[in-house]
Amino acid sequence: MLKTISSIKVKTYVGYTNDVKLRVLKHNSNKGAKATKGYKWMVIYKRRFDDKKKAMSFEYRLKKNRIKRSIILKDYLDDK
């Protein structure tokens, strides 16, 4: 899960990748998903899976679950 850097409104983004560093680099250079364009992003949560099917299933559920996303964001901010 990504979070915007230095934005007035905090936004989060959830996505699947097998190369986190490259994916964040693409998002930060406006070559990632449409929803990420115009913002700078940082990783606040990542999780490893044994196979793509499990990873994509988790990604889908997390994208739909705003409560879980806000809990992850709150935990990240509390650790700061």
Image (cartoon, helix red, strand yellow):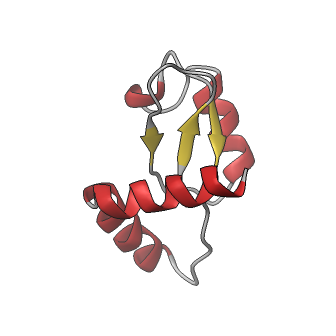
> Residue reaching furthest left?
64
Toward which corner of the image does residue 48 lie, by quadrant? bottom right
Q: Position of residue 57 (x, y in %)?
A: 35, 72
- Foreground residue among 54 and 74: 74
Q: Position of residue 27 (x, y in %)?
A: 58, 31
Residue at 55% in and 45% down: 2
- Foreground residue among 32 and 3: 3
Residue at 50% in and 15% down: 38
> Residue reaching furthest top?
38
Q: Is residue 57 above or below residue 75?
A: below
Instruction: Count up the numbered dots.
Output: 0
Is residue 70 left or right of 67 when viewed as pictured?
right
- Foreground residue among 57 and 67: 67
Toward which corner of the image does residue 63 lie, by quadrant? bottom left
Q: Position of residue 40 (x, y in %)?
A: 62, 25
Q: Is residue 72 above or below residue 24?
A: below
- Foreground residue among 31 and 43: 43
Is residue 24 left or right of 33 when viewed as pictured?
right
Q: Is residue 49 above or below residue 28?
A: below
Q: Position of residue 32 (x, y in %)?
A: 52, 31
> Residue reaching furthest front?
78
Is residue 69 left or right of 38 when viewed as pictured?
left
Is residue 20 left or right of 73 when viewed as pictured?
right
Q: Is residue 17 above or below residue 38?
A: below
